[in-house]
Image (cartoon, rainbow, N blue to C red):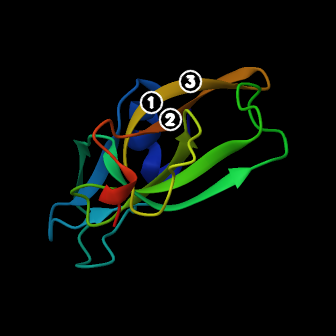
Amino acid sequence: MKGLGADQPYWDALSEGRVVMQRCEGCQKWNWPAVWRCGNCGSWEHAWHPRELKGQVFSWTRTWHHFGAPAELKPPFVTVVVTLDDTDERRLLGVLMPDSDDICIGVRVRGEVHKVHLEDEQIPAIRWSLSPQQTIGDSV
């Protein structure tokens, strides 16, 4: 994946099965989407740090119709926006696997990077699952 701009290190790491997030060296604020210059302090200095894919569901939707998604996503499937732990509430998108009736805002999830087939390419994606210790009463 070439020429994607300030977020290139994110995509490179994702292609390798890892997640890295950008943090400003000036004020230590996490930036996502990635930036060239920090909007908080104006610094041009940033570093990329490995992050665990752990967090809680910020939003979710269940898709009932095929709309050109990768073949392995058979409707219905759940797409989630997850607030990552320890990143100033930065959020990443992915698919909940397996689908669950226990999905709700605030539920704890863990993620893993995998590849999906889209047309003639394999692209990196994040697959989320409910945290093992999670029960519906634990949600926020």
Which is more toward the observer, 137 or 85? Answer: 137
- Give the side of residue 65 with respect to residue 5, left or right: right
Determine whether label 2 and label 1 are within 8 Å by CB: yes
N-term-proximal mark, 3 vs 2: 3
The residue sitting at 80% across, 47% down in the picture is 64
- Give the side of residue 77 with respect to residue 137, left or right: right
Amino acid beneath label 2: Arg
The residue sitting at 22% across, 79% down in the picture is 41
Quadrant for the N terminus, please: top right
Amino acid beneath label 1: Val
> Label 3 vs label 1: CA separation?
7 Å
> Label 3 vs label 2: CA separation?
9 Å
The residue sitting at 54% across, 44% down in the picture is 94
Residue that numbered label 2 is attached to = 127
**Residue 127's spot in the image, x, y percent?**
50, 35
Would you call the spot at circle 3 few (<14 residues within 10 Å), some (14-19), or many (20 or more)? some
When asked about the image quadrant of residue 121, the answer is top right
Does 67 sit above or below residue 72?
below
**Residue 93's spot in the image, x, y percent?**
52, 51
Residue that numbered label 1 is attached to = 113
Residue that numbered label 3 is attached to = 115
Amino acid beneath label 3: Lys
The residue sitting at 26% across, 66% down in the picture is 88
Q: How many marks?
A: 3
| Residue 66 seen from this side | yes
N-term-proximal mark, 2 vs 1: 1
Quadrant for the C terminus, please: bottom left
**Label 3 vs label 2, nearer the camera:** 2
- Give the side of residue 96 with respect to residue 137, left or right: right
Q: Which mark is residue 7?
A: none
| Residue 34 seen from this side | no
Label 1 element class: strand
